[in-house]
Amino acid sequence: MAKRVLVTGGAGFIGSHLCERLLKEKSEVLCVDNFFTGSRANVLGLMDNPNFELLRHDVTFPLYVEVDEIYNLACPASPIYYQRDPVQTTKTSILGAINMLGLAKRLRVPILQTSTSEVYGDPDVHPQTEDYRGRVSITGPRACYDEGKRCAETLFFDYQRQHQLPIRVARIFNTYGPNMHPQDGRVVSNFIIQALTNQPITLYGDGSQTRSFCYVEDMVEGLVRLMACETASMPINLGNPVELTVEELAMRIVALCNSRSAVTYRPLPQDDPTQRCPDIGQARERLRWSPKVNLDDGLMRTIAYFETRLSGASPLLSLSMRAAS
Ligand code: NAD
Ligand code: UDP
Ligand code: UDP
């Protein structure tokens, strides 16, 4: 019998790719989303598949369904969106985790939480290993997301200890690829749209802060492997360990787009981490996983996606031009 898999946040960027992958493996997929940052468009190509079901629902409210596995992705991931309604972000992280853990507890099924590198805050250990406890602002503008995700991890481990629930926790580092929301303000999508439209590239601060970028296909492979791993009873970093500055990223994207865009400097947002790079030793050892898609290949695929969207949808073009001006 086909496995029934619940993906919360399944109409979002990573969730839509995960749904597609699970359907390819012949699972039945129940995608639950309130469309806060995700959209039907991301899963339009899956709608005709009889094994796919889309349910509009907010995970801060209880959900009674019957499934064999749960991936909990519901939560806005872009700083602009998670700071737009910070109270809702905290509710989504914490009440959403409680409801999905309650569901997993009733059904006695494995549940995977998509946590984040943000649990490390602005780190003073580099690269970040899972045993590093982080340097996170409790009260700053990013805290709704960072502390929400930290508390969600606490809940996962308490349900494991108190109710012997099979849990998995993935700490995801910056991920990019097709289906990123064009206006969600994340660096890869911003820079690509700006470069494709020959608008100024908005570099926050002096661009010396670092990130490491994982292509979404690699990320989905990591999540599926983690779910299948019964011995991963600790949080596992998933990300690409190749680190570069945001300025270097801008230059790569401008070159790959063959763009005339110049750089314009904007203030660095408060609490913006100065460096971030995963230590993926645990993922390599326990999941036999490491990213396969190099940055240029992943960027080219993402650029092709945004090119298609720009040529097909004029509202996107005009919005991005307004944002850049
Ligand atoms: P996304 O914003 O594209 O997707 C999140 C999805 O969750 C959206 O479809 C949104 O509508 C939905 N959602 C939000 N609140 C909800 C609620 N209350 N009820 C139901 N659905 C809700 O983000 P993403 O990049 O796909 O991120 C997916 C998960 O991975 C998130 O939990 C995020 O924190 C985590 N993550 C992502 C990254 C990254 O670089 N993309 C990095 C670290 C962690
Ligand atoms: N819950 C849910 N679906 C279920 C079972 C529980 O949404 O199938 C929610 C329920 O609303 C509850 C939460 O999960 O508030 C936590 O459930 P748990 O059993 O851990 O706690 P309790 O019900 O005892 O508060
Ligand atoms: N950033 C930038 N210009 C942009 C968007 C983002 O310079 O138009 C920077 C941002 O300040 C951060 C990095 O790029 O240092 C990554 O930002 P993003 O919002 O993608 O993710 P974060 O890692 O901060 O959650």
Image (cartoon, helix red, strand yellow):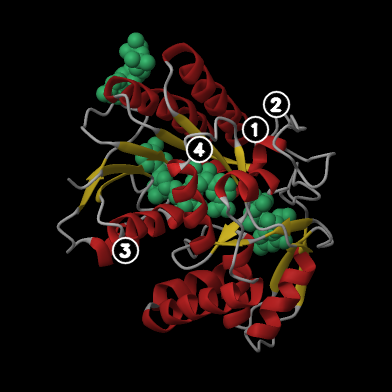
Amino acid type assigned to the residue bearing label 1 in the image: Ala
Alpha-carbon neighbours of circle 1 within 10 Å: few (<14), some, or many (≥20)? many
User: Does label 1 point to a residue whose CB lies under 8 Å from ligand 3?
Assistant: no
Mark sitting earlier along the chain (1/4): 4
Alpha-carbon neighbours of circle 4 within 10 Å: few (<14), some, or many (≥20)? few
Amino acid type assigned to the residue bearing label 3 in the image: Ala
Q: Quarter of the image holding residue 309?
A: bottom left
Whether residue 77 can be seen here:
no
User: Does label 3 point to a residue whose CB lies under 8 Å from ligand 1?
Assistant: no
Find residue 45 and report its horizontal and vertical position in percent: 27, 67
Residue that badge 3 annotates: 41
Residue at 48% in and 40% down: 229
Label 2's element? loop
Residue that badge 4 annotates: 85
User: Does label 4 point to a residue whose CB lies under 8 Å from ligand 1?
Assistant: no
Residue at 35% in and 37% down: 70
Label 1's element? helix
Residue at 49% in and 69% down: 319
